[in-house]
Image: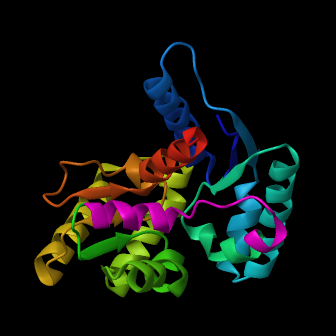
Amino acid sequence: MKKIGMLGGMSWESTSTYYKLLNEEIKHRLGGLHSAKIILSSVDFEEIEKFQHSSLWEETAEILSNEAKAVENAKADFLIICTNTMHKVAPQIEENINIPILHIADCTAQALLKDGIKKVALLGTKFTMTEDFYKNRIEEKYKIEVVVPNEDEQDLIHEVIYKELCLGKCVKKSRDEYIKIIKRLEKDYDCEGVILGCTEISMLIKQGYVDIPIYDTTKLHVLSAVDYALKK
């Protein structure tokens, strides 16, 4: 079994889900008392969040690159960045380490392709929904059309992530608003599925809340990591 490197803490709420799912999946596949081999570096999200909202991406890249090097030095065989948004600086992190990064957008797009999805809605932080690093990767590399909410909806989604979900709060009113947005995107744009493109959104939205398939990026990232860890 390869040793999984985790770059977490963004937020720790979703990182704890990663840790739990990784171990559950290893146990499911191998049985007995098996658990995942993990090296975890968890950052202080307060520092990262301030840099994000000040557009100080080089500063975040430097912090995460240093943590990634520490994970590599602890003998991790590969790295997963346990957040969608911070894949914005994945190229800078890759430049500073010699172990592979499993990109969360790749495993998500591969699941979409497997299901024959050609047009998908994307919910996430405003950074993920509006910038090129995530949706362009899916559109250009995998030829899947990505639809994002309008500006007002983006603001609401973003605020719920940072002011509720990252603090471990699941509010029914917010869930209802998210469902309303997904249903509008399905109706107005014929979206065939929806990407939960923030690792915390899976705390709020589950399959069955809407009619179209939900693609939980946290779970898909975990499955990809376990596949890689167990590949001979």
Q: Is residue 66 above or below residue 202?
A: below
Quadrant of the drawing holding the N terminus: top right
Q: Which residue sits at x=43%, y=52%?
A: 220
Q: Which residue sits at x=30%, y=55%?
A: 175
In percent of width and height, residue 167 lies at 55, 49
Q: Residue 232: within the magenta?
A: no
In percent of width and height, residue 54 lies at 70, 81
195 or 36, which is in the foreground? 36
221 or 15, which is in the foreground? 221
Quadrant in which residue 176 is drawn: bottom left
Quadrant in which residue 138 is drawn: bottom left
Confirm whether residue 168 shows in the render.
no
Confirm whether residue 151 shows in the render.
yes
Q: Which residues are magenta?
A: 94-114
User: How many callouts does the rendering have?
Assistant: 0
Work out which residue is located at the far top of the displayed protein and give it.
32
Decide if residue 66 is on the left or right side of residue 110: right
Q: Is residue 213 above or below residue 230?
A: below
Decide if residue 95 is on the left or right side of residue 191: right
Q: Main secondary structure of the magenta part?
A: helix
In percent of width and height, residue 163 lies at 52, 60
Q: Residue 101: within the magenta?
A: yes
Q: Which residue sits at x=23%, y=66%?
A: 193
60 or 150, which is in the foreground? 60
Q: Which residue sits at x=62%, y=76%?
A: 88
In percent of width and height, residue 40 lies at 73, 43
Q: Is residue 193 above or below residue 137?
A: above
The image's colour scheme reads: rainbow
Quadrant of the drawing holding the C terminus: top right
